[in-house]
Amino acid sequence: MPRTTLLRQLLQQRHLTTHEAFAAQYERAAARLAELDRDPRLASLQVSPRQFDRWYGGELLTLPRPDACRVLEHMLGRPVSELFSTAYDGAPAHDRDEESSTAQQATSAPPTREDDESPLDIVTRTRQLTASNADDATLAFLDSSLEGIASRYEQDGPYVLRPQARQVRQLAHTLLDGRQPPRTRRELFRLAARASGLLGYMAVNTGDFALSEAYCTEARDLSREIGDLDTDLWACGTLSFSLYYAGRYDEADACAAAAVERAPRHAQSIRLLANGRARALGKTGDRRAVEQTIGQAFRLSDLHDVPVGLTSCISFEPYGRARTLANAVTSHVALRNTAQVLRDAEHIDDLVEHSTSSWSRSLVRLDVATALLQQRTPDIDHAMALGREALRLCGDTPISSIYQRSRDLHEQTGPWRDHPAVRDYGDEFRTWSSQPAALAMASSAS
């Protein structure tokens, strides 16, 4: 005999007692829910005659699959735990408590004890708690998308890859508005934090330092919410990087120093020391602190056995030795330690020239060119040749670090403005910096 459930009562009240009538209403509800949840898979849900007979007849031992439960709840406006529970024949669901109380008052017999929840109620609640709008395949897709952006960054640049990073961040945020179990939610927080961090790094390279600070703060806060120290420290390093190129050297050093203090032996602290502290300290003229910080970075590199080569500038992996030494070169340029600049640059020359990063090759050339002008006997021809090579390597993909260093090199050539090599470099710099992207950087720097 069919069991009278609330689902059966509601379908009777709405004249949905045949498969055809019910299926039409169910499919409309699924389509509407798919639109609201932005989940196109829901729109394809259908109900077979056999499924309808089992639901209508109350023959279920377990609840329908989670997506079907969501459609039923949207369609009928009641929790699934109530829909498939036994109903009082002839009485609306909202009158049950009142009728039960009246019946107990009308008899002198002790009330019959009932369990608080049925097994079906427990299964229903478990399904609700573990339901998720993001499966492992979706998480893997987001993760691989971020890895792809990072791996292609030094070839394609921020202007090409920024829209993709924004899409990943937006999708992660949209999913976080839904329901997930803790493991899935934690992974979505991690991915959202890394997408924000990448966008923060890109904003530095395009000269938008206020936007970078906002993205980096978001990345840091999201990663701290789940205790992801690796992403947290990386975001702090990128925030320090942004403050450095915004000319806020004391703040850049303080930001990196605070992060190092939290995790002095962590692999991400190599970047915080070399890219964050040493370069900022060089700009403030603190020679002793620069030497100590660079030495600390290399000792930490020994501890973690990092790669020898020039790791990607935007990678979440620890800094390689050549990348750390390239940052040391920049620190020594600021201190006018010319001999040290030339020695360190020669040490990494082969690794830099064989790297896939045209930006790194440009930046090292600009540092060396500046050092050549700082010598007691300036090598003007060689310095200007390196400056022109740097501009050509960067081509039509300018980034703020190259713009700033090539501009600084041009300003330092003032005493030799009549020298032919200086005039040639000045002409090439003006042409290169007339690109729309470079003009935007010039505007943000002024």
Image (cartoon, rainbow, N blue to C red):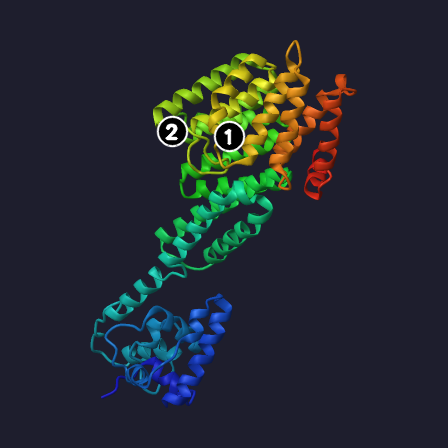
Q: Secondary structure at mark 1?
A: helix
In this rendering, the answer to whether 85 lies above or below 328 is: below
| Left or right position of 96 against 231 | left
- The percent coordinates of residue 350 (x first, y second) are 47, 26
Residue drawn 47% across the image and 75% down it: 31
**Residue for badge 2:** 306
Residue drawn 59% across the image and 34% down it: 242
Which residue is nearer to you in this view: 65 or 268? 268
Which quadrant is the N terminus positioned in?
A: bottom left
- The percent coordinates of residue 218 (x first, y second) are 53, 43
Q: What's the CA distance linking mark 2 and mark 1?
A: 20 Å
**Amino acid type at mark 1:** Glu
Residue drawn 71% across the image and 28% down it: 425
**Residue for badge 1:** 353
In this rendering, the answer to whether 339 lies above or below 120 is: above
Which residue is nearer to you in this view: 71 or 208? 208
**Amino acid type at mark 2:** Val
- The percent coordinates of residue 42 (x first, y second) are 43, 71
Which quadrant is the C terminus positioned in?
A: top right
Residue 280 image-quadrant placement: top right
* N-term-proximal mark, 2 vs 1: 2
